[in-house]
Image (tube, rainbow, N blue to C red):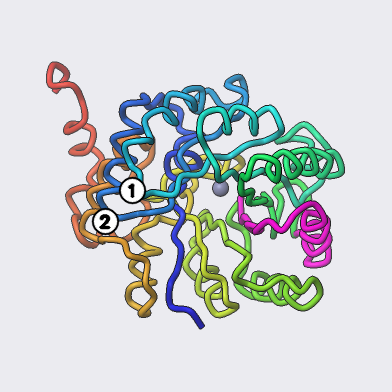
Amino acid sequence: MAKQVKVLDVTARDGLQNEPNPVSTAQKIALIEKLVRARVSNIQATSFVHPRWVPQMADAEAVAAALGRFPDVHFSALIPNLKGYERAVAAGFRNLELTMSASETFSHKNLNRSREQGFEILEQVSRAAERDGVVIRVGFAMSFHCPFEGAISTATLVEVVRSAREHGPWHIALADTDGMAFPNQVATAVKAIQEELGIPASELALHVHDTYGRGLANVLTGLEAGIREFDATTAGLGGCPYCPGASGNLATEDLVALLDGMGYETGIDMEKLLDAAEFASSFSSRPYQAHLLRAARGAACDVTERLARHLPSSQK
Ligand SMILES: [Zn+2]
């Protein structure tokens, strides 16, 4: 089994989209620059959703315009529909994630459409992507559990993944959006997708939240099942919109430490990644809740000190 693992850092998108405090475009670019210095080569930079729904992502075009200075990095962006696709492609992106939902109720509540309508959008986006030479990843929110419907059965997940693949050869990201997945459920789902649909684990990604502390356990299960692509956010930014105050995505530094320690190759420089984590944590409205930064640089996690460092000097 390949020892190379792709780490997709989604801090600038998933990590920031629910943050109550506005983060400026310049700060987002500074964060991306720190990730690039840490040799993170896959970064989800923004989301082309309507600013009314996600005000924090209203500067998607401005963020995109600044990415040209990092030529060796694979940037991607999230899109909810064809309009988002057109904006993202016009802004220069060639790797896009179309967000869909494994849960019918979450699809209505979060995307304002049925799952069926989602597949119609996938069809439109797929044809446009083929025409434009753009690569799509289909991300299924609530792949394992939904705050409205409870557990999502493996059969349901297999069905939506099957339908998605009818529209294009796209890689599929299984997102544990509310962090409620258990490792045995992840193992069963990945096995079923491979066996029933013939999709190799190398075409799957796991998008991990750590709401209940099961993030690394689910990653380990994914690794054992052959998955080699994982999403995380630096400093564990982000969250679950239905669990206010809960910890966010799995932290990139915790993910990379696990992978490094187990002999997998990510190409990421841990010391510099911790610089990025320290910087990222200054955007969070919550204390640092992941592990590595606390273990390596305890003081960086002190909320009082952190706030003091990032206040303008006139307010210190
Ligand atoms: Zn997420």
Q: Secondary structure at mark 2?
A: helix
Report the residue at 77% width, 31% height from top: 112
- Is residue 157 found inside the magenta-colored segment of the image? yes
Looking at the picture, tell me which residue is in the foreground, 70 or 207. Answer: 70
Residue 288 shows which numbered tag? 1
What residue is shown at x 62% (from left), y 55% (from top)?
175
First in sequence: mark 2 vs mark 1: 1
Q: Are marks 2 and 1 in contact (CB under 8 Å)?
A: yes
The magenta region covers 152-177
In the rendered view, would you say 35 is above or below 229? Answer: above
Q: Is the residue 125 above or below the residue 3 in the image?
A: above
Which residue occupies the extreme right position in the image? 116
Residue topped by disc 2: 293
Q: Is residue 222 left or right of residue 292?
A: right
Residue 170 rendering spot, x and y as whole percentages:
68, 56
Assess mark 1: CB under 8 A from ligand 1? no
Q: Secondary structure at mark 1?
A: loop
Residue 210 vs residue 76, the one in the foreground: 76
For the point 83% across and 66% down, which residue is it?
155
**Does residue 88 appear left or right of residue 198 in this picture?**
left
The C terminus, quarter of image: top left
Pointer 2 local density, CA inside 10 Å: few below 14, some 14–19, many at least 20 = many
Q: Residues within 10 Å of mark 1 (few under 14, many from 20)?
A: many
- In the image, what residue occupies the spot 43% across and 52% down? 42
Horizontal relation, residue 286 to residue 269: left or right:
right
